[in-house]
Image (cartoon, grey):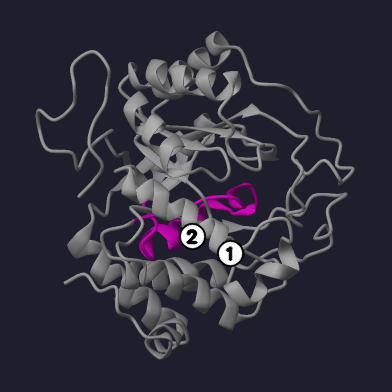
Amino acid sequence: MLRTDWTLAEVTAIYHQPVLELVSQAAAIHAVTQATGEVQVCTLLSVKTGGCPEDCAYCPQAARYHTGVQAHKLLPDAEVLASAQRARDAGSTRFCMGAAWREIRDNKDFDRVLGMVEQVNGLGLEVCCTLGMLNEYQAERLKAAGLYAYNHNLDTSREKYDDIITTRTYDDRLNTLEHVRKAGISVCSGGIIGLGETDEDRIAMLHTLATLEAHPESVPVNALVPVEGTPLAEQPRVSVWEMLRMIATARILMPNTMVRLSAGRQEMPVTEQALCFLAGANSIFSGEKLLTTPNPDFDADQQMFALLGLKPRKSFKDVPEGAVLMGRGKAPVEA
């Protein structure tokens, strides 16, 4: 039975179990609720890079930091569609488009993104966007264009949040998730570890996600990739044991959710990634870049899948048969 009434004490007790017991418990739940030999391959493309007015301390796309990221305007539609086709041909079943905006504005650029959503949908891919904050009307427009999922991470706990970002509030993020859910779009929301937060901050973030009115259909677990020029450039690398605790706890709290092993995979050998899959991760981002940071390419991931006996999850797997509209690739969100 799915629960959204977890107490902070319960989440704390789960998280602080001996790590082998925690992974064992998560693996048992994963085996019941998920196909253990199946991992969804996603691709994330930055369709508009750099120049962001926000001050997220981890982000190389913030205009105020000198990180060497070259800003560019919205990519041409043809280039985006070609990237989506390459991703599909390489085995990706979800294609996410990211724009370095603080919030969506009702202008020609947003209209163009809506067109991109429709075109990528026509390829049979689950289409995801991460475009910053949005309102109810904008969420409804994305849904009408055929958007399957929207990513908007909480990043960290409410208590730690102001140390990382001051240009928007924690409630701003939660309000965006509410608008996404109300529009009938699949919710993708997780966080980043390695920001200088405590175990208590990590536990609090997971507690917030697991006690939303409905669990997010997708929870990305990111390890900070320190970038020179950002305030967090000198942060140490997150260990695999920290990732395992986050992934396993997320799997126990939200058994039906896709738990995504996201940023930081470039630094993880296959043995560490295998442990994460055992602990309940069942999705990865593949491709040379994750927005602007390095990421394993498709060939490396295909070799890993062959070694571990994994296969890619199909698009729209949990959507009722016959629900996809012919010719446009639209589908209702996962139940």
Residue 286 image position (x, y, % from top left): 51, 36
Q: Residue at x 67, y 66 (%)?
A: 194
* Res 146 → quadrant: top left
Task: Provide the residue designation for mark 2.
Answer: 174
Is residue 280 visible to the viewer in this orientation of the structure? yes
Are the two marked residues, 2 and 1, in contact with CB atoms closer than 8 angstroms?
Answer: yes
Q: Residue at x 28, y 49 (%)?
A: 37
Task: Provide the residue designation for mark 1.
Answer: 170
* Left or right: 44 in relation to 9: right
Magenta part of the protein: which range?
A: 258-282
Q: Amino acid at mark 2?
A: Leu
Q: Which mark is residue 105?
A: none
User: Label 2 neighbourhood size at 10 Å, few (<14), some (14-19), many (20+)?
Assistant: some
Q: CA distance from mark 2 to mark 1?
A: 6 Å
Residue 107 image position (x, y, % from top left): 59, 23
In the rendered image, the vertical position of residue 25 relative to residue 289, given as above or below: below
Q: Amino acid at mark 1?
A: Tyr
Front-most of residues 81 and 41: 81
Q: Residue at x 56, y 46 (%)?
A: 133
